[in-house]
Image (cartoon, rainbow, N blue to C red):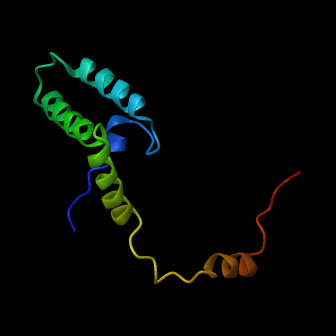
Amino acid sequence: MGKFKDYYMVLGVPPRAHARAIEERYWEQAHQLHGEPTRRAVKRLRLINEAYETLGSPHRRERYDQQRAEFVAPDRAHLRPGLLHMVVSLLGKPFRPD
Protein backbone atom coordinates (compact mmCIF):
# COMPACT_ATOMS: atom_id res chain seq x y z
CA MET A 1 0.00 0.00 0.00
CA GLY A 2 1.29 3.45 -0.86
CA LYS A 3 2.09 6.18 1.58
CA PHE A 4 -0.97 8.18 2.60
CA LYS A 5 -0.67 11.97 2.88
CA ASP A 6 -2.51 13.29 5.91
CA TYR A 7 -3.52 16.74 4.69
CA TYR A 8 -4.93 17.70 8.09
CA MET A 9 -1.48 17.14 9.57
CA VAL A 10 0.15 19.04 6.69
CA LEU A 11 -1.96 22.11 7.43
CA GLY A 12 -1.92 21.58 11.20
CA VAL A 13 -5.68 21.50 11.67
CA PRO A 14 -7.91 18.88 13.30
CA PRO A 15 -10.07 16.68 11.03
CA ARG A 16 -13.23 18.42 12.24
CA ALA A 17 -11.87 21.88 11.45
CA HIS A 18 -14.24 24.37 9.88
CA ALA A 19 -13.54 25.45 6.29
CA ARG A 20 -12.60 28.93 7.50
CA ALA A 21 -9.94 27.52 9.87
CA ILE A 22 -8.46 25.46 7.03
CA GLU A 23 -8.29 28.51 4.79
CA GLU A 24 -6.69 30.67 7.49
CA ARG A 25 -4.07 28.03 8.25
CA TYR A 26 -3.31 27.60 4.55
CA TRP A 27 -2.71 31.32 4.02
CA GLU A 28 -0.65 31.54 7.21
CA GLN A 29 1.69 28.75 6.11
CA ALA A 30 1.83 29.89 2.48
CA HIS A 31 2.75 33.41 3.60
CA GLN A 32 5.59 32.07 5.78
CA LEU A 33 7.08 30.10 2.88
CA HIS A 34 6.51 32.63 0.12
CA GLY A 35 9.73 34.07 -1.20
CA GLU A 36 11.93 31.44 0.43
CA PRO A 37 14.16 30.19 -2.41
CA THR A 38 15.12 26.80 -0.97
CA ARG A 39 14.05 23.54 -2.59
CA ARG A 40 12.67 22.38 0.72
CA ALA A 41 10.39 25.43 0.95
CA VAL A 42 9.18 24.95 -2.61
CA LYS A 43 8.43 21.28 -1.92
CA ARG A 44 6.58 22.19 1.28
CA LEU A 45 4.59 24.91 -0.51
CA ARG A 46 3.50 22.39 -3.15
CA LEU A 47 2.34 20.02 -0.43
CA ILE A 48 0.44 22.81 1.34
CA ASN A 49 -1.23 23.78 -1.95
CA GLU A 50 -2.19 20.17 -2.60
CA ALA A 51 -3.67 19.88 0.88
CA TYR A 52 -5.66 23.09 0.50
CA GLU A 53 -6.95 22.11 -2.94
CA THR A 54 -8.32 18.91 -1.41
CA LEU A 55 -9.61 20.19 1.93
CA GLY A 56 -10.81 23.54 0.57
CA SER A 57 -13.42 21.91 -1.68
CA PRO A 58 -16.36 20.32 0.18
CA HIS A 59 -16.75 17.56 -2.42
CA ARG A 60 -13.03 16.70 -2.51
CA ARG A 61 -12.82 16.87 1.27
CA GLU A 62 -15.69 14.39 1.64
CA ARG A 63 -14.00 11.94 -0.73
CA TYR A 64 -10.65 12.45 1.02
CA ASP A 65 -12.22 11.83 4.45
CA GLN A 66 -13.66 8.53 3.19
CA GLN A 67 -10.27 7.44 1.86
CA ARG A 68 -8.57 8.59 5.05
CA ALA A 69 -10.98 6.59 7.20
CA GLU A 70 -10.20 3.46 5.20
CA PHE A 71 -6.45 4.02 5.50
CA VAL A 72 -6.31 5.12 9.15
CA ALA A 73 -8.74 2.49 10.45
CA PRO A 74 -8.20 -0.66 8.36
CA ASP A 75 -10.26 -3.77 8.95
CA ARG A 76 -9.89 -4.70 12.60
CA ALA A 77 -11.70 -8.05 12.45
CA HIS A 78 -8.60 -9.77 13.83
CA LEU A 79 -9.03 -7.95 17.16
CA ARG A 80 -11.39 -9.56 19.61
CA PRO A 81 -13.87 -7.15 21.20
CA GLY A 82 -13.15 -8.37 24.73
CA LEU A 83 -9.37 -8.06 24.53
CA LEU A 84 -9.14 -4.94 26.70
CA HIS A 85 -11.46 -6.50 29.29
CA MET A 86 -9.29 -9.63 29.38
CA VAL A 87 -6.08 -7.62 29.85
CA VAL A 88 -7.59 -5.54 32.64
CA SER A 89 -8.92 -8.67 34.38
CA LEU A 90 -5.48 -10.33 34.20
CA LEU A 91 -3.46 -7.31 35.28
CA GLY A 92 -5.97 -5.70 37.59
CA LYS A 93 -7.10 -2.12 37.63
CA PRO A 94 -4.45 0.58 37.19
CA PHE A 95 -3.07 2.04 40.40
CA ARG A 96 -4.19 5.58 41.13
CA PRO A 97 -2.70 7.32 44.16
CA ASP A 98 -5.20 9.41 46.09
Percent x, y of residue 54: 25, 43
Quarter of image, res 72: bottom left
Percent x, y of residue 68: 34, 57
Percent x, y of residue 9: 36, 42
Name the residue at 26% across, 36% down. Answer: 52
Name the residue at 78% across, 69% down. Answer: 93
The one nearer the camera, 69 or 11, is: 69
Quarter of the image for the N terminus: give it.
bottom left
In the image, farthest residue toward the right: 98
The one nearer the camera, 61 or 35, is: 61
Percent x, y of residue 23: 34, 28
Name the residue at 64% across, 75% down. Answer: 84
Name the residue at 45% across, 41% down. Answer: 14
The one nearer the camera, 87 or 10, is: 10
Compared with residue 9, is residue 2 higher up or lower down, i.e. above or below? Answer: below
Quick check: 98 left or right of 65? Answer: right
